[in-house]
Amino acid sequence: MTVQSTDLEAQLDAIRQEAQQALTAADTLEQLEQLRVKYLGKKGPIPQVLGGMGKLDPADRPRIGARANEVKDAIQQDLDRRRTDLQAAQIQAQLEAETLDVTMPGVYTPQGRVHPVNAMTDRVVDIFVGLGYTDVEGPEMETDYYNFEALNFPPDHPARDMQDTLFLPDGNLLRTHTSSVQIRYMEANDPPVRIVMPGRCYRRDTVDATHTAVFHQIEFLAIDEGLTFTDLKGTIREFLTQLFGEVPIRMRPSFFPFTEPSAEVDLQWKGRWLEIMGCGMVDPNVLKSVGYDPEVYTGFAGGMGVERLAAVLHEIDDIRRLYTSDLRFLQQF
């Protein structure tokens, strides 16, 4: 059966017209891609029309082939134009959506600041790191052994009453000082030791202008052969000089179960003597508890409250101000 060339030409013209209308109506690039596959793909209508060329008169075949190529080229051109239009519209829509009206009033966002407790902690730790110490931390929930026994607090020692500890139902406790970190570190490391230990501590203190139940403490510890009280005093003087400048200091005899001899350090600030930290030489019993030979090694340690340091340095009359979240107060730092 012979197919008339006019029939195939009519089919090609219909495909061209249908494709043109479909491409004009496409609203998205995804739709456009679907139409490309539909009309120009291997399974599209044009290859189906060309499949009937075998029934044409041989003289008509070149003309129908050329016509088919014209239709494909026309559809491709319409496709490219529509793609360009849709891409331009997409870019324009994005620009309009992201346009900022610079004449509108801005939204005020207050500048963030480092809390004075954190700032003081960082400052103290930086000083000791500069002196060759390593910053270490430990758990806030402790056992009686690490918080007391290994630090020369026997079970019936009256010094335990000084701590006013918060005990937990499982027999553990919330650490009363960061001294427990000293024991944990020395158990895992051989001397020499030089560490600084910042952290949060807990005691059942009545909250007032100088005490809180939750407070921050920083301790330092040095263990080596031949360390003396003179080394301790020199370290404290260098630390306080870097923190406060050249100010008078004095050391008063005191008592701590884990140091012997022990001392309180006072600082003359704004015409007054202020207690700033406790310190002393590490008690031989503490060295024995971690396996250090007290006949070979000696050491010194000291500890201070971060809130107390901040109160002295910034002349704060009540440390409770550090925790009121009053922006009028905090914005001064």
Image: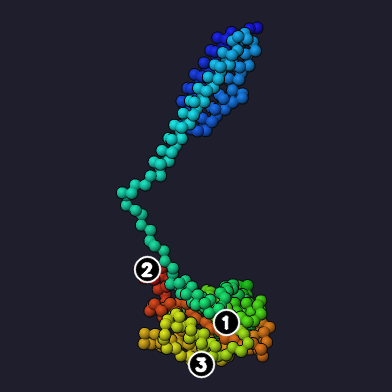
| Sequence-earlier tag: 1 or 3 | 1
Question: Compared with residue 180, is residue 255 higher up or lower down, i.e. above or below?
Answer: below
Real-space Cα distance between discs 3 and 2? 39 Å
The residue pinned by badge 3 equals 253
| Sequence-earlier tag: 3 or 2 | 3
CB under 8 Å between discs 1 and 2: no
Q: Amino acid at mark 3?
A: Pro
The residue located at (59%, 23%) in the rendering is: 44
Real-space Cα distance between discs 1 and 2? 34 Å
Q: Give the image location of residue 163, x and y in percent.
A: 54, 82
User: Which residue occupies the foreground of this view, 291 or 322?
Assistant: 291
Q: Amino acid at mark 1?
A: Leu
Would you identify the image quadrant in which residue 108 lies? Answer: bottom left
Q: Secondary structure at mark 2?
A: loop
The residue pinned by badge 2 equals 331
User: Which residue occupies the foreground of this view, 309 or 159?
Assistant: 309
